[in-house]
Amino acid sequence: MTDATDNAPSAPQISAEGLFLSFGKKEVLKNFSLNIGRGESVVILGRSGCGKSVFLKCLLGLLRPDDGKLFWQNRDLLKERGAPRELRQRIGMLFQSSALFDSLTVWENVAFGLLATKRMNRAEAYDVAIERLAEVELPPETALLSPAELSGGMKKRVGLARAVATRPEILLFDEPTSGLDPIMTRIIDDLILGSVKSLGATAITVTHDMQSAARIADRVALLHGGSICWQGGVDALAAPEDAGNPSLLQFVRGESRGPLALSAEKE
Ligand SMILES: Nc1ncnc2c1ncn2[C@@H]1O[C@H](COP(=O)(O)OP(=O)(O)OP(=O)(O)O)[C@@H](O)[C@H]1O
Ligand SMILES: [Mg+2]
């Protein structure tokens, strides 16, 4: 599958159709379309500033496209004025900057969704938070720290533990492994894979790490010029010359010249 118009094989769980989103005169998403099947792991690649995080925020309902359709199965989220609360609670998101609540302890951050949505009492939520922290190799002693006391990589891992805490149906990971050492990167990749393969979640991950992408993705989509300019199987990352797409080839090889240079010049 190498054509940007191809669809995911099964009926999509999430379907973006012709999204447009601008900030003032800056057009970020331009006719952006992407289907994601239930239980699929899709990695979105693209140059810095091309709109990857903006798309994830649209899915979460934090940003509202100016035009287009955004379906969750057969519900058009944009008609319902932002992702309704009930759907948002079924999404777990790791923000690029981790975005932890500074006024809460580590365990309270991780347990935030459990306390808000599952009506667990604090003792139960604490126990689950400790389990989730262990999944990202953070010991129980971390639980009572405040985010300010954590290293950058530890914050990222707490953000991940929070994203997966309620075992949500849909996981959005914005650069889950940036700033992590290679061993931790592998552990996080395995956590993402486990969430998809064992727990049946649908995952959309933005990453610049090609090794991670190759490990976790069923499908890869390249965002450029506001829309998906290529999508296909993960094998294309190992042999981009076979995909027949100059943008993908340039991106995977990290070459400064090529079709993707244009967006950098505009920035
Ligand atoms: N809230 C906002 N207000 C105005 N402009 C924004 C806002 N959020 C994003 N942008 C702009 O939208 C464009 C896309 O931003 P986005 O954060 O999606 O990039 P990205 O692809 O995630 O890049 P990176 O790989 O660096 O994280 C950028 O030009 C950015 O300046
Ligand atoms: Mg981003």
Image (cartoon, helix red, strand yellow):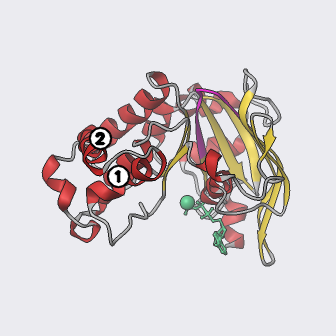
Q: Residue at x 69, y 63 (%)?
A: 63
Label 1 is placed on what type of residue? Answer: Val
Question: How many neighbours does mark 1 have within 10 angstroms: few (below 14), some (14-19), or many (20 or more)?
Answer: many
Residue carrying label 2:
128
Q: Quadrant of residue 36?
A: top right
Q: Is mark 2 within 8 Å of ligand 2?
A: no
Asked whether residue 153 appears in the rendered view, the answer is no
- The image shows residue 65 at horizontal and vertical percentages of 78, 60
Mark 1 lies on a secondary structure that is helix
Q: Hey, which residue is sitting farthest left in the picture?
A: 141
- 82 or 138: which is nearer to us? 82
Position of residue 55 measured from the top left corner of the image (x, y, whole percent) = 67, 54
Q: Quadrant of the N terminus?
A: top right
Q: Which residues are magenta?
A: 35-44
Query: 102 or 87: which is nearer to us?
Result: 87
Q: Main secondary structure of the magenta part?
A: strand
